[in-house]
Amino acid sequence: MLAKLAWNGMKSKRKDYIILLAGLVMSIAIFYMFQTLALNRDFTSENAMISSMQLVFNVGSCLLAAVTFFYILYTNMFLLSLRQQEYGMFMLLGAKKQYIKRLMFVENLLIGIIALIIGIAAGAGLSQLTAELIMGQLDVTLEGYQPFYLPSLAVTLLFFLVLFFVTAVWNHIKLSRLQVLELVHAETKSDQVPQQPKKNIVTITAGILALAAGWLSLIFMESLRELGVFSAAIMTTLGTYLLFSSLLPVITNAMKKKQKWNENGIQSFTLSQLTFRIHSLKKLLATAAMLIALGAGAISGGMAFKNNAENIAERSAVYDAVVHSPTAEEEEILEDITFTEAAEYRYKKGEEYNYYLKEDLEKQRPQIQLTTDNVKRVEADLPDQEGSLEEVEEESASIPNEWSQFLTMTAAEDYSRRPLIVSNALYDDIEAEEQVVFIGKADDFLAYRDQWAKLDELREEKLASSEEVMASTSKYSMYENYNTIATGTVFMGFFLGIAFLAMMASCLMFKVLSGAAKDIPRYEMLRKIGVPKKLLNQSVFKELFLVFLFPALLGITHVLIGMNMFSFIIVNPYYRIWISLLLFTTIYVLYYLLTVKMYKSVVLPEEK
Amino acid sequence: MIDSVVNVSNVSKVYGSKGENQFQALEEVSFSMQEGEFIGIMGASGSGKTTLLNTISTLDNVSRGQIEIAGTTITEMKEQALADFRARKLGFIFQDFNLLESMTVYENIALPLFLQKMGRGRVKEKVQHVADILDIRDILSKYPAIISGGQKQRTAAARALVHNPSIILADEPTGALDSSNAASLLETLQRLNEEHQVSIMMVTHDAYSASYCERILFLEDGQLYKQINKNGTREEFFKNILDEQAEAGRKKL
């Protein structure tokens, strides 16, 4: 009978249970999503560019497990608050405590199991969807990734069953300690008095030190190696938690103390709400900051590996197109491309040498790449060839370095043939068909990927029918080769990024919404004393903005510093990082607006 | 009539839409209240007294009829204008205090003034002034969670008073107070009314509380069926009210 009553009680609080269940399902789904990658060693080792990828996944698993653990504790506290009053009333009416405890225990596990079933199904669906989406975007197919992966399923089941069991026992103990009256009045109990935050110098200092240690490990990851991965993960997390829990109350209090802000319209309410709430929010905000760091970091990392292809290509050659004696078809493709710099050099092929026409080289001095970041135009004088062809051949070593570098690396079709620079008169005497090599630098390398691919294809065909043996690689094929190797890593970055961001979203949203019911009377009262709806709206926007701002700031700082850790494998980890940050910001802002909307629908119901 | 602060004419309120279960909460209620009056509205549960107060406090709209407060016909105003009207012309005291627990007593009282964007100096002056009247000056920096029920209700009264509203509307203000705190609050309201000419309309079901008023309107089943005036001491008035309640009860037998 009581069980039936309890069930009815649950039904009447449907909205709250949906929030609770959604929170649980999300955390399970994402945990599972992460595990489909982390445990699928064949896939990760096959596709990762980093040798210690498995270690990264293990550390990530631990972090995620810790975050999930705290998340589940939050959801559990919410569940308890939902049920306390009703169970108290049952006891008041004479139900035995033993029975109530059993009921609570069963309810706990039941909700856990329902959440697990939906969560794993959602996780598999999400994994499939995300994987397809990313592969579609990257335009690749990766073998070996399985959205439905049994070991991940087992680990997820085990982890959460243990967690739910622990929380059920925890509630059991907590219920034993509470008196009936405490339960009945659980909801009317006034909130805690906002305390003056103690300026805890020790905690703040410890937080700053831990954060500094974490950031230093990120910056010097290359020399610290595995140790760096551990210390970065532990120290950054520790620092974030310490700083948030010690500093946030101080900051919000300082904002409230500033009278010009506080005593201005609805702001006094907004800031009070925030100071009031920050105590219960600070740990969650630290969690959100970490998840933002991991999520935005993973996306930025993935993006950096992807963008790195362009940098690698850029370093491999100055010129985007090198075409020898273009055919009509090739000419046509070249015409589609806007070149910022283009040149044509005439030459003739001999047995051992390529004979380049001095006049063309003189008139169109090319650029060469000296070191990775140093591109310069060739300045060296061209050799004077006074004698016969034989004499010139003998002095072939006298060609200035810069010229021979350009001629062998860029202009030669087969670099086994050494270059010679000859005057008009000598050139005319050489009995060979005149060739011409076109070199060009386009205004935007990436914009013409189709054209480069086509040119490479045509070149393949031409080479197949000639006897050239040591053909040089084109800039585009460098780009493509790198892309192929990096794709797996890019995929993992994006996949994890999405998973972490979803987790962060679900965490923050859960916390905001689960507390919303308690705010209803506050807004109701404000409305009664004549605060216009517009102001109440503003207040909600502002308060949640600040709630969202703090973790984002620290999270992004983590990312900006953390990108250093890829510097050993990526040319420039910060190249175009604004794109991934912009992407993150867009998602975050959308998500902020969604939370505001949902929160408003709870505390500011529409007028009838 | 300049000196009538509230004018209610032929107000009816029907809950529920046509064809469904309709409930007539108010039926053709008419009365007016002079400036500086202290009126009580009495009636059993479900008699419509809270509905009446809600319509006067612009929180609920009427089905028919017209309400005028301080020369403004509120029944014709839009939501936005109503909020502004509430903020400037009305002061509320609720049964359960409705203080914001995240704000100090000072901030709670000052909130209506902050909302009007009043300068800091004047806000302080005004808050201290009402705090003196209500004898809560010592607790201004405290949070509501640690003050007594009586102090909470005084704080609520101070908040209702701080912006010099045309009328204070009180809904069972003593409902959550013990008898000595209740008496003290009622005396305060009476003093505000007598010494500061504050117009007060109070809903109550308690004869003792009602005896502090000057005039009582009796509601039953949504209809105003009687009103009595205080013509002597409070004790006599209290007896009159009890007699009236007894009379009403006898009729039902």
Image (spheres, rainbow, N blue to C red):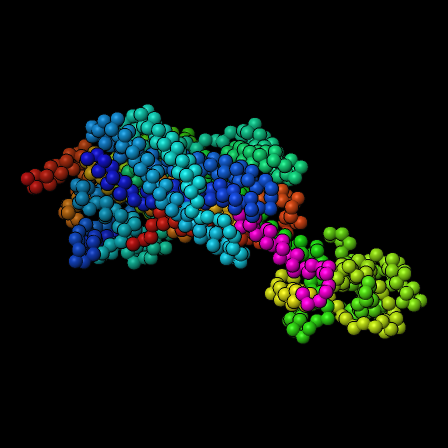
Identify whether A475 is placed above or below A70.
below
Please report the residue visible at 38 percent of the width from the left and 51 percent of the height from the top: A533
Please report the residue visible at 43 percent of the width from the left and 33 percent of the height from the top: A194
Quarter of the N terminus of chain A within the rendering: top left
Residue B219 visible from this viewpoint: yes
Outermost residue, bottom side: A328
Q: Position of residue A221 (x, y in %)?
A: 64, 38
Outermost residue, right side: A387
Q: Position of residue B84 (x, y in %)?
A: 37, 52
Quarter of the C terminus of chain A within the rendering: bottom left
Tell me which corner region of the image, top left, top right, bottom left or bottom right, holds residue B140.
Answer: top left
Which is more toward the observer, A269 or A168?
Answer: A168
Outermost residue, left side: B253
**Is A469 covered by the magenta stretch?**
yes
Please report the residue visible at 61 percent of the width from the left and 35 percent of the height from the top: A226
Q: Position of residue A339 (x, y in %)?
A: 69, 67
Is B201 left, or right, of A62 in this rendering?
left
Q: Position of residue A499 (x, y in %)?
A: 48, 46
Tell me which corner region of the image, top left, top right, bottom left or bottom right, holds residue B123.
Answer: top left
What secondary structure do most residues of the magenta stretch adopt?
helix
Which is more toward the observer, B57 or A452?
Answer: A452
Q: Which residues are magenta?
A: A464-492
